[in-house]
């Protein structure tokens, strides 16, 4: 079993829709959870960083962590064509190893 | 947010030459830096992990003599692709872990084309 599982998509939604992206993980020691956005031929950009369980909101983006279910989510409200990218989840424990999902490709159609 | 600068963003070289890519954390100290390789429409492939002042730890299948990594300070790591060949052409990305917050930031990536 992989440490982190993420549905690769592709996911296609109309502009204005709410997008839900998810990852599951198997290691209960993970404490730090991150979501990145990667445009083609660019490095990943950190969108959200969460420690432990709970919700975090930043503009149109909301990150949720449910440690009991080992499940994290990223919600994008009022999605825009500029949100079209690949979204990566990542997580780490107390050490300095980071584990990534495979990325979900999102297209927002105008 | 914190910035990781990667340079050059694009390099073209002849087969047999060596290419050096730099990765700098601009406003934080990075205990650990990571180097990845990414093929088109594929996920990141971790090549090696480097800690400041010590030898890099390479992932299985990555040739340490081919991909030389130096992490001389808390803000700079370099990847040197030695005797590059066309099959080394790829997108190389670095990331740096903030020693205070634990956040991981990525560079913009370097596209290497070996002719």
Image (cartoon, coloured by chain):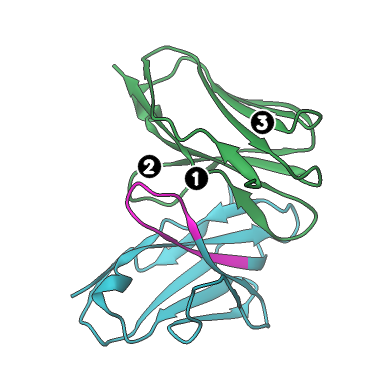
Chain colours: A green, B cyan
Answer with mark 1 or mark 3, whichever residue precedes in sequence: 1
Chain bearing mark 2: A
Res. A45 mark: 1
Chain bearing mark 1: A
CA neighbours of label 3 inside 10 A, class few (<14), some (14 to 19), many (20+)? many
Q: Secondary structure at mark 2?
A: loop
Res. B5 mark: none
> Residue at left 65%, top 73%?
B74
**Which residues are the magenta region?**
B33-45
Q: Residue furthest front?
A: A1
Q: In this figure, which residue is indicated by the disc labeled 2?
A: A39
Q: Which is more foreground, mark 1 or mark 3?
A: 3
Q: Is residue B70 left or right of residue A9?
A: right
Res. A72 mark: 3
CA neighbours of label 2 inside 10 A, class few (<14), some (14 to 19), many (20+)? some
Q: Is residue B27 visible?
A: no
> Residue at left 49%, top 68%?
B23
CA neighbours of label 1 inside 10 A, class few (<14), some (14 to 19), many (20+)? many
Q: What x and y, as percent, mark residue B17? A: 28, 87
Q: Secondary structure at mark 1?
A: strand
Work out whether residue B43 or residue A51 is closer to the camera in this orientation and state it.
Answer: B43
> Residue at left 65%, top 59%?
B97
């Amino acid at each position: 079993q992989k440490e982190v599982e993420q549905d690769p998509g592709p996911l296609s939604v109309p502009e204005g829709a709410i997008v839900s992206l998810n990852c599951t993980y198997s290691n209960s020691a993970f404490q730090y959870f991150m979501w990145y956005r990667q445009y083609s031929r660019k490095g990943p950009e950190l969108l959200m960083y969460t420690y432990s369980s709970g919700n975090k909101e930043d503009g149109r983006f909301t990150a949720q962590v449910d440690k009991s279910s080992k499940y994290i989510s990223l919600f994008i409200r009022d999605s825009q064509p500029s949100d079209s990218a690949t979204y990566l989840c990542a997580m780490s424990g107390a050490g300095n190893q980071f584990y990534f999902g495979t990325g979900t490709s999102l297209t927002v159609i105008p | 947010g914190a910035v990781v600068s990667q340079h050059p963003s694009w390099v073209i070289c002849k087969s047999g030459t060596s290419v050096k890519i730099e990765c700098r954390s601009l406003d934080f100290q990075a205990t650990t830096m990571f180097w990845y390789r990414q093929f088109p429409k594929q996920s990141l492939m971790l090549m090696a992990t480097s800690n400041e002042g010590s030898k890099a730890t390479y992932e299985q299948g990555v040739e340490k003599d081919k991909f030389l990594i130096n992490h001389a300070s808390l803000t700079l790591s370099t990847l040197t692709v030695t005797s590059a060949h066309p099959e080394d052409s790829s997108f190389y990305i670095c990331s740096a872990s903030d020693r205070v917050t634990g956040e991981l930031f990525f560079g913009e990536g370097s596209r290497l084309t070996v002719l």
